[in-house]
Image (spheres, helix red, strand yellow):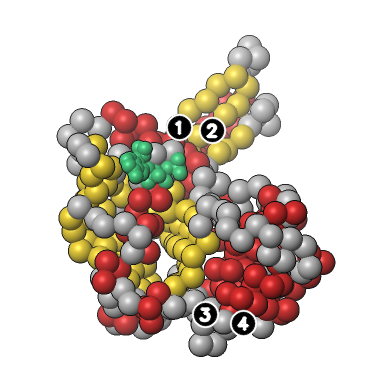
Amino acid sequence: MTPPRTPADVVVEARDVTMAYGDADVLRGVDLDIHRGEVFALLGPNGAGKTTTVEILEGFRRRSGGEVRVLGADPERGDDAWRGRIGLVLQSWRDHPRWRVAELLGHFATYYPDPRDPTELLALVGLTGQADRQVNRLSGGQRRRLDVALGIVGRPELLFLDEPTTGFDPEARHEFHLLVERLARDEGVTVLLTTHDLAEAERLADRIAMLVGGRIRACGTPAELARRAAAQAEVRWTADDGTPRRERSKDPSRLVWELHRDADGPIPGLEVRRPTLEDTYLHMVHRAADDTDGTEDAKARAA
Ligand SMILES: Nc1ncnc2c1ncn2[C@@H]1O[C@H](COP(=O)(O)OP(=O)(O)OP(=O)(O)O)[C@@H](O)[C@H]1O
């Protein structure tokens, strides 16, 4: 049985956070709880406010309203010691273009009391071969790996990853996923990830929150969210006259049994499709677009 959580297990706590840019309300009351050692993914369409949310949690942006605690402190008042416990992988590293990779990493390591060994870190992110290259000579994917290395050189307790695998080839993406899993599982690092890649969120995240229309519309494990998309599975088959048929059912095995009985044999083109995370996501996005009263999903608040 999972032991009850203590306040110390809650690494990020946000209550009713609002953000307006001028008269544009971007966040309309965001609630989040992220627990120690958890990989938490924030999903949402372009312009939903993911980066704004993350910047508020990082202490880079002043919120318009609401309460936030990150590692026990209000990010707007986080000091250097607090900042040293946080790792950031921002959208891309643009400074120090002429520095060499190992040199830049070694330089950043000096900012922290107990940094990772830069040589080991280069191996960890697959950049050993590029140690002596200038930063501006790296490929997009290599540069992103360097961003990740810079984000974890100080052994952060909480790591923010803003669209970390943009530009990665499939192998680099796979390696990166293994690295995030290792950081969370072996070192207890809490990870907040924003991504547009649903497969990545499903693969990596313990829990996923969907930010749509300025609110968290759903939050749960990938399996919970997929189940909530539609309780009904979709059964597809080909009718006797060759036309494709589809029907939603809460009891697909019964429907298949009835079809089998009526056909008196195998059912041509039979497929039973369970709702996926993508179904949930699209459902939330479309529902939010139709949502005129703006009612927040009651289950959205993290457990
Ligand atoms: N500094 C700013 N001033 C005014 N408006 C802003 C500012 N930053 C962001 N916005 C607006 O706030 C909204 C949310 O932006 P944000 O970057 O947080 O969204 P996002 O979910 O991260 O989007 P994406 O998936 O495209 O990266 C957008 O409409 C954006 O234009």
Q: Which mark is residue 116?
A: 4
Label 1 close to label 2 by CB (< 8 Å) = yes
- For disc 2, the neighbor class at 10 Å (few under 14, some 14 to 19, many from 20) is many
* Image-quarter location of ligand 1: top left
Q: Amino acid at mark 2?
A: Val
* Label 1 near ligand 1 (CB < 8 Å): no
Asked if residue 166 can be seen in this view, the reply is: yes
Quick one: quadrant of the N terminus?
Answer: bottom left
Residue indicated by mark 3: 111
- For disc 1, the neighbor class at 10 Å (few under 14, some 14 to 19, many from 20) is some
Q: Is residue 218 above or below residue 176?
A: above
SS class, disc 2: strand
Q: Amino acid at mark 1?
A: Arg
Q: Is residue 239 left or right of residue 83?
A: right
Choose mark 4 or mark 1, whichever is in front: 4
Residue indicated by mark 2: 235
Query: Alpha-carbon distance for marks 2 and 4?
Result: 52 Å
| Residue 36: percent from left, percent from top | 41, 76
| Residue 96: percent from left, percent from top | 61, 61
Q: Is residue 147 above or below residue 24?
A: below
- For disc 4, the neighbor class at 10 Å (few under 14, some 14 to 19, many from 20) is some
